[in-house]
Amino acid sequence: MKKALLLLASIVLGFTATAQEVDENGYTTVNVSMQPAYTNQVYFKLATNTQTPVVTSSWDIAFQKASGMNLGAVRVNDGKVTCYEASADITTWETIDVANESSWTQLYNSETEWSIGAFDNGSENTPSFGFGWGLYNISTHHVTGTRIFVLKTSATNYKKLILQDLDPMAGTFTFKYATWNGTEWSADETAVIDFSDNEGTEFIYYSMETNNTVSVAPADTDWDFVFNKYYGEVSMGGTETVMYSVTGALHNSNTGITVAVKDEAGETTGDITLPAEEDYTEEINTIGDDWKAFNQSTMSYTIPEKTYYVKYDDGTVYRMYFLTFEGTATGNLSFKYKNVSATMGLGDFDTNKASFSLYPNPSADKNVTVAYNNTDLTTEAGELTIYSITGSKVYQTKTNVSQTQQLNLSALNSGMYIVKLQAGNYTETKKLIIK
């Protein structure tokens, strides 16, 4: 049974619609701060240029809203928590000893898909019925916990827990936990997760510090990727790899987003060749953490020549590339992006047959003249469409490619736009700047 996606989220500090700084090539510059020591996770939405900072330490466990035959995933906040399987025998609950930490097995969330969490990687693997942390009962359709886990949040803070019961039909998840106070375990706490909570998101988040569910980051449709700390597989040279805490971006495949990466310079004024369809992937770490590299000589980060193409399920494509990363001292990073959807599947004008120009460009008074040069085009009828840099259609009119045309664009805000002219089988796009 395939478990469904789980996003990382937490207490929302507030949405921030960043002021757009659009350059002459149509790219918006974005500055993001995760704060020193990566105090925040930051969610970002390209279409709205919106940032949502989230306190990294505000949640511990995230539960997918299971229902019916979808049993869900259970992830830990690996920007805060180290997760261990401490025992495969739940009858040893009273004798769990933090002095035995070295014998416990550390577990990790998947870095390539949201649908597998650290708890799902537990040792309960009874064929057909084992789900890492518990066993599925074919008669009751419940999953009952069979493993004891310990979450470590600091050198001295431990929480032991058992995921006791998942009832996907009722939409509830029951678990118990206790806190190590330095000498002994506290009284047991029991929590019940109700999947009807937090409408607009697919996941419920729990804090064992506040003993309650917490308000979470943006709704599923309000973010494309999150900048955060997570465990990723890092090469040790040759074929050897280890799981290591890294900082990067994981994208939201839950809403159909896919990403392709190309080894090319981000800053370019030339034509863009979009990735082939098969180059896009759902793997959530396609952006990941290797958009920056640490230089041991300068003790600073450098940015390799890589670009990322973020594709929505409606076909919209954004091109983005990174500019800076300052590391844990500030948590600051920056990147540029623009909507390149207007370049998809469009044939260029044959310059021997037709062309068009815009003037003045930039336009200070929002009045623009379109001049056509139709020397050998079989049709004179065309259509002129203007798009914002987010891909929204903001203006459209019929046109005659044998005549000069005046456009009154007073309804448009200042900024960069894409103007597309289509006449018969010929299509051409140009940039327009309105001051």
Image (cartoon, rainbow, N blue to C red):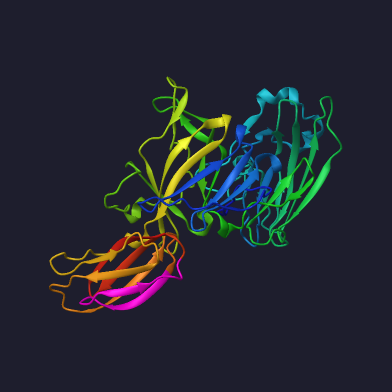
The relative height of residue 318 versus residue 250 in the rendered view (above or below) is below
**Residue 116 visible in the displayed image:** no
Q: Nearer the viewer, residue 353 or 156?
A: 353
Q: Nearer the viewer, residue 55 or 48?
A: 48
Quick check: is 404 in the magenta stretch? yes
**Residue 20 visible in the displayed image:** yes
Name the quarter where the C terminus is drawn.
bottom left
Which residue is depicted at the point 65% across and 61% down?
Answer: 67
Percent position of residue 263, x then y: 33, 41
Percent position of residue 158, x then y: 75, 31
Percent position of residue 125, x then y: 60, 43
Percent position of residue 307, x then y: 37, 44
Which residue is depicted at the point 62% across and 32% down?
Answer: 106
- Region in magenta: 394-412
Whether residue 327 sits left or right of residue 239 in the image: it is right
- Which residue, as the protein is rendered here, is positioned at the far right? 187
Where, by quadrant of the figure, is residue 240 drawn? top left
Q: Nearer the viewer, residue 230 or 420?
A: 420
Whether residue 180 sits left or right of residue 354 in the image: it is right
